[in-house]
Amino acid sequence: MLSSIIAHIPDWLVFFQAAIAFLLPVGANYLYNILNAWGNTGRFTAAAAGRNAAHKDKTALSASQPSPSSASGTPFSGNYAADLQAIRSAIGSNSDLHFREFPLTKLHTKGTLIYVDGMQNDRLLNLRIMEYLMFEATADTLASPLNSVPAMPFSDLTAAADLTAFNRSVLFGHAGLLIDGMPHGLLIELPGGANRSVTEPVSEALLRGPRLGFSEVLSENTSMLRCQGFSDGLELKSYRIGNQMQKDLVIAYMKDIVNPELLQEVETRISTIDSDFLAESGYVEQLIEDNWLSPFQQVQNTERPDRVISALMEGRIAILLNGTPFALIVPVTFSMLLQSPEDYYERWLPGSLLRMLRFAAAFLALMAPALYISFISFHPGLIPTELAISIIEARQGVPFPSIIEVLILEVSIEILREAGIRLPKPVGPAMGIVGGLIIGDAAVNAGIVSPFLVIVVAVTAISSFSIPMYSAGITLRLLRFAGMLFAAFLGMFGTILFFLLLCSHLTKLKSFGVPYLTPVSPFRLRDWKDLFFRAPLSLMKRRPAMLKTQNDRRKSKV
Amino acid sequence: MVRRTVIVSLCLLFSVLTSGCWSSKEIEDLALYTGLALDVGEPAPVEKEFEEKGGTYSKQNKVVATVQVVPIKSASGSMDKKGGGGGGQQKPYSNVSGAGDSILEIFRQFSIRRDRPIIGHHLKVIIISAELLKRQTISQLMDFVMRDNDIRPSTMVYISQGTARDTLTSDQPNEIPSFHIMGMIRNQSRTSKVLSPVTLARLDALTYSKRSFVLQNLIKGDGEVEFSGAGIVKGDTGHWIGFLNQEDTECVAWLNNEGKAGAIKAYDSSGEPMTYEIKAMDSKITATADGGCISFSVKLSSEGRFIETWNDQDTSSSQEFADNAGRIFEAKLAKMMQALLGKLQNEYQCDAAGFGDKLAIQQPAVWKEVKDHWDEAFSKAKIEITYDLKITDFGSFTE
């Protein structure tokens, strides 16, 4: 009895292997937790959210309320000379700052216009404002019958709350006005710094669709959103983010569609951003994303107002930052990375075809080199015989194992791509020819790589260009190398392991509470209409179920 | 904390690094064999010389295995394909022979002669010489190739009248003979003299059930190979017992309902040849058992075209002419069928045309009684054949 049981107990080697098989994922998980905890310092957490919220001032643009004063500024003394002196001593050392003192003839008093070079229209400043102030302004206009702001004929006129805010605004580009006898400094004229014209979005070109792209000016961008259609549902909420240099940030949503919990979550994360300066919306993206260790982006960035507005209509939320043409869309799911607005602008059959093509291209871009390595180095039986023979013939001059061979060509292609971005436009095509000739033909002739690999790498490169989101393309480029290593270690088995690992990671990943792989997992059949293929518009009667919107009907009659 | 993290990450790293590129074999360091020929044991000249110098091991030389290895290694890889257009018509394959008693052992003997290990994933054809199959049974010879899990069950098995390894040679400069043989079955759509290939998967079932079957026969003549009829392997012994000629093979295909096309040539009353092109062929075998007497009635039907005649006089398309010609073709077909049945029932006494299957399906009770001595029972069975040839058209011609 006992001996028959003992006969079935495996030897130590099996136990050792079992221990490794158990400890490997446990160890990986342990490492992940440590890294995650370490990287999360300085980012939002649930506990920090409530604490920091009080420090940030927020304004609703729709309410047109002047921003409440922050407690830290020194107040105006009310004395013209003293205030002017205070301003001079605070910011007067800037060489581009102009103090223009002038008399107000009708009032028999004097004032100073303070402005920064190049940020105001000089002609307007000279002709209209100075002329008005010097010769037309009367005591009535300075009196303030309605509110704290004097009745002067400027569309943009606010009273600065304190000296610090006044200084900041002047340096940001507002024209500041200080008048003897007025208790507050006034801010007239919005800043009008150097600006470019609105152009077609470069990173997301479409054949069919609006040619309009966001610009660097936040007010222009928000106006582009407003211009998309008549609605009182579009709500914009403004924040001022940054410790050292503050920047305007706007979150946009459709107030009768968006899920309030999602909105609450976005507001919390935005308000807990603790950074001295946000140079680009990428900063915001990285500070509010769920998992900073994931290779996949959990926030979508776009230059296209039409893309933003259709995301808003699905119940998503957009985040726009001043100074960048890239708006952020949250939450994002995996399928969005492979969708292009054109899918909806074209008819549904070509739209569906192109979308499925993109899924195939994404798979190729991710897996093609890994499959090549596993076929060449591990599974010669899986290649059709004639092809196997020609591969053997082609590779007989190649001195490297396939992983090295693939790495050589892949790395040089990536270098070529990286160089191509930075090249001046006239040199670009020449570089493409040189790169194509040298890397493709010469490398084969020199016997460094096999001609078959050139095809694989070329297909991979072309496939990765067909992904509509640039940042998703980078993710796949990165993961491709990981896939190649897995394939080099364990062949097809490793490639499949790599794919499963990706799948399990994606299943666990969430973007603002929405699982990344919806509607595949969790399974929502309703949303499959807009996943691999795009159903006709007449069938898409409801908004995506994954966003749990307040109002999920897209049509007046369902 | 930091130390523990470092230790954990080192453990993870080492578990990956120590495994290395597990079981990685670059494809260019391997040699594929696409054909295998089995002959009676008579060591090849190379091996004889080895043996004279003492390169031998204990064996009885029961079989000679020849593998066709592609592609052969060229000195400068892919480079010389462009440059040396006229430089020596080198054959794209090389045949390696070894004598011994076990096929696997012979394969492993190749490993001490060659620079690249041979792999069997791409084995396409196996050719066994009839002489060898007379001495050894088919299941003995095929045991290794059926057990080996590199070799695919789709590998095709042929028999050869002469030396099997000769069929794996070719005079054509850029042709690999095993691919040529494999490709020849495409002609099944043109003539039923090409039988459906017996794959290892089919062979496994046939040998296990101890049924007699036919293997396509390969003959070699002046640098070319030909499918010439078929060799019969008797089920209960597993040995080759004889050949069927090409017309017999056509009839076997028709009886088995495997044929798709072909031609029947006959001579008309004035002795000029005329030809019937088979566009459709069908056979229906009905088995009846009356007491101890088993009989089959076979209905062969065909549709086709009157495609060729050398007689200038009778270019008629009348129904009468068609009936007349049809009778002549039917008579020719009947002659062929009787010849086949004569061989199967009297000369070889074995059922290689699938009559047993029909009996097993239609009369299972009778089959159970006779299946152990079916070949004998078959030779006594009565077979009646009715023919129904229909000439549907006469092609295009001016009257």
Image: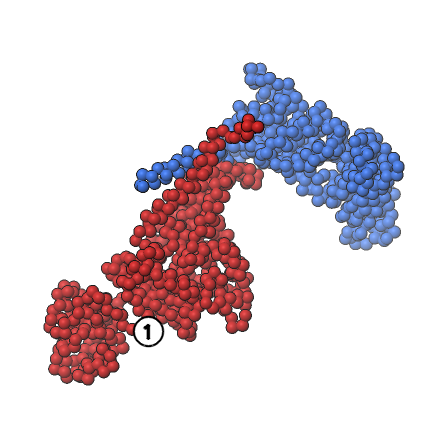
Chain colours: A red, B blue
Residue A84 place in picture, x, y as percent: 13, 71
Relative to B149, does residue A293 appear above or below in the rendering? below
Residue highlighted by disc 1: A63
Query: Which residue occupies the foreground of this view, B246 or B63?
Result: B63
B112 on left or right of A254 = right
Asked if one can make out residue B396 in the rendered structure from this viewpoint, the answer is yes
The residue shown at (80%, 35%) is: B368
Quarter of the figure with residue A246 = bottom left
A119, above or below A281, in the image: below
Q: Residue at x 86, y 33 (%)?
A: B380
Lateral position of residue A207 relative to residue B213, left or right: left
* Chain name for mark 1: A
Residue drawn where x is 38% and y is 36% of the image: B11
Front residue of this view, candidates A89 and A468: A89
Decide: is B393 above or below B234: below
Side of B124 where A10 appears, left or right:
left
* Residue B343 visible, this orientation: no
- Left/right of residue A49 with respect to residue A120 in the rendered view: right
Could you tell me residue A157's position as x and y percent?
24, 75
Mark 1 Cα-neighbour bin, 10 Å: few <14, some 14–19, many ≥20: few
Q: Residue at x 31, y 41 (%)?
A: B2
Amino acid beneath label 1: Ala
- The image shows residue A438 at horizontal and vertical percentages of 40, 45
Q: The C terminus of chain B appears in which quarter of the rendering?
A: bottom right
